[in-house]
Amino acid sequence: MKSPITFNRPTLVGNELDYVRDAIEQGHISGDGTYTRRCESLLRELLGSRVLLTTSCTHALEMAALLLDIHPGDEFILPSFTFVSTANAFVLRGARPIFVDIRPDTLNIDETRIAAAITPRTRAIVVMHYAGVSCDMDAILEIARNHGLPVIEDNAHGLFGAYRGRPLGTFGALATLSFHETKNVFCGEGGALILNDAALESRAEVLREKGTDRSRFFRGEVDKYTWVDAGSSYVPADVLAAFLLAQLEKRESVQEARRALWIRYRDELASWVQERGYALPTVPPECSPAYHLFHLVLNSAEERSAFIEHMRGRGIQAIFHYIPLHNSPMGMRLGGRPGDCPVAESVSERLVRLPFYTSMPAETQQLVIDAAREFF
Ligand SMILES: *Cc1c(COP(=O)(O)O)cnc(C)c1O
C-alpha cells in the first residue's frame, strides 16, 4: 500500500542538524545561549520589536496574562473559534472568558461584536489571526483605544503575514508566536513573546527567568542575580533555538513554497468549490496571508464527514478543528452556552483542512486535488 498523505510533515529546510551539533559542541545546551540570541535578534529585525523566545506559544500567552496582572474576577474577550491556549492562559489567572462570535468570511473575531462584550471587568481583548489572515485591526485597535484596553495577538498562525503592510504580531501590546511542529517554521515545541510595549520588557525578562534578574546578570548589569518577582521557567533550550534559527533563515523559501501550494489549491479547486456551494478561504485586500493552512467550508456536518471518509479511502488525511470553546465542557463551566456564537458553531461543523506542508511535492498535492474533485 502507498504511504498515506498526512496533513502535516515537518521537514528539515536548511542547517538544522549542523546548528544543533554546533550548539552541543559549544557546550551550551540550556537556554539563552548564542542561538537563542540570534533567533531573537532576527525576529526583532523582522518585526521591529523586542522578542523573547519561550518554551511554547501557550507559555508566551501565560506570560502575557501575568504581565497584564490578570486577576480572579477579571474578564477577557476572545473569539470562540480558536485553540484552547488562547483561553487557558487567562483562565489560569482566574479570569472569565467572554466569547465573541467570528466573521463568516475570515473566521476571525467579529469586530462588530466586541464593544457589546465589554464590561467594567474587562481587562484585555485577545485576538487570533486565523490561518494567518489578519483580523480587522483598525476596528479592533480603535475599540481598544476607546475603552483603554490592551490587545493581545495570539499570532500562532500569522508569522510573516501582514495587515496594511505591517507585520502581524506588531499591533497588540503583546503578541505570541508558536514554533510547534505544525507551524510554518518550527523547532518541535517552542514559541515567542513579542513585546510591542517597551514598558513590559524588564518584567517579562524576570518572569521568564524564574522570577530572577538573571538576564541583567548575563548582560553584566548586576553583579549577582536574585529573586525579584514571581516567575516561572519559560526559557527554551539553546539546541531548540539552533534548530529554529536554521528554519528562520529559510523563511523566504518556506513562505514561497507555502504560497505556491495555497494558490494552487485555491485555483485548482475554485470551479469544483463553486459548483458545490462550498467556501474557499477569504483574504481581504488589506491582508497579506501567512499561508499557515488551507481550509474549505462545506455545506453541512454530514457532508464534511462524507468528505473526510472519501479522502481517507484514497489515503489522504483531511482533518478539522476547532471545537468552539464557548460550548466545550470547560467553556460551559465558565458561562458559555450553546447558541452564544452561532457562526463559530456552524463553521466548526463544516470546516475541513487539506494536507498542507512546506515540503509537499506538487505530485502529492495533485493527488489531493484530484481526490477532492472526485467527491460528488
Ligand atoms: C498552535 C497554537 C497555539 C499553541 O502553540 P504551542 O506553541 O503549541 O503552545 C496557540 N494558539 C493557536 C491559535 C495555535 O494554533
Image (spheres, grey):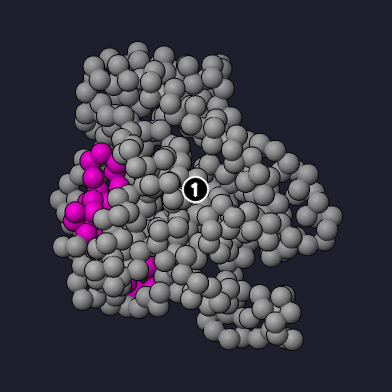
Q: Residue at x 52, y 81 (%)?
A: 230
Q: Residue at x 28, y 68 (%)?
A: 145
Residue 29 percent coordinates (x, y) = 75, 60
Q: Is 102 in the magenta?
A: yes
Q: Which residues are magenta?
A: 90-114
Residue 27 percent coordinates (x, y) = 82, 61
Q: Residue at x 41, y 70 (%)?
A: 65
Residue 370 sits above or below residue 36 on the image: above
- The residue furthest front is 165
- The chief SS type of the magenta part is loop
Residue 47 percent coordinates (x, y) = 53, 55
Is the residue marked by circle 1 packed among few (<14), some (14-19), or many (20+) residues within 10 Å?
many
Residue 83 sits above or below residue 321 on the image: below
Residue 343 sits above or below residue 11 on the image: below
Residue 157 percent coordinates (x, y) = 44, 46
Which quadrant of the rendered structure holds the C terminus? Answer: top left
Which quadrant of the rendered structure holds the N terminus? Answer: top right
**Residue bearing the label numbered 1:** 159
Question: Quadrant location of residue 286?
Answer: top left
Describe the element under mark 1 as helix, strand or loop.
loop
Q: Residue at x 30, y 47 (%)?
A: 108
Residue placed most toward the observer, 284 or 127:
284
Q: Is residue 333 visible?
A: no
Question: Quadrant location of residue 278?
Answer: top left
Q: Is 325 in the magenta?
A: no
Task: Please state which amino acid type lies under the numbered disc 1.
Answer: Leu
Question: Quadrant location of residue 149?
Answer: bottom left
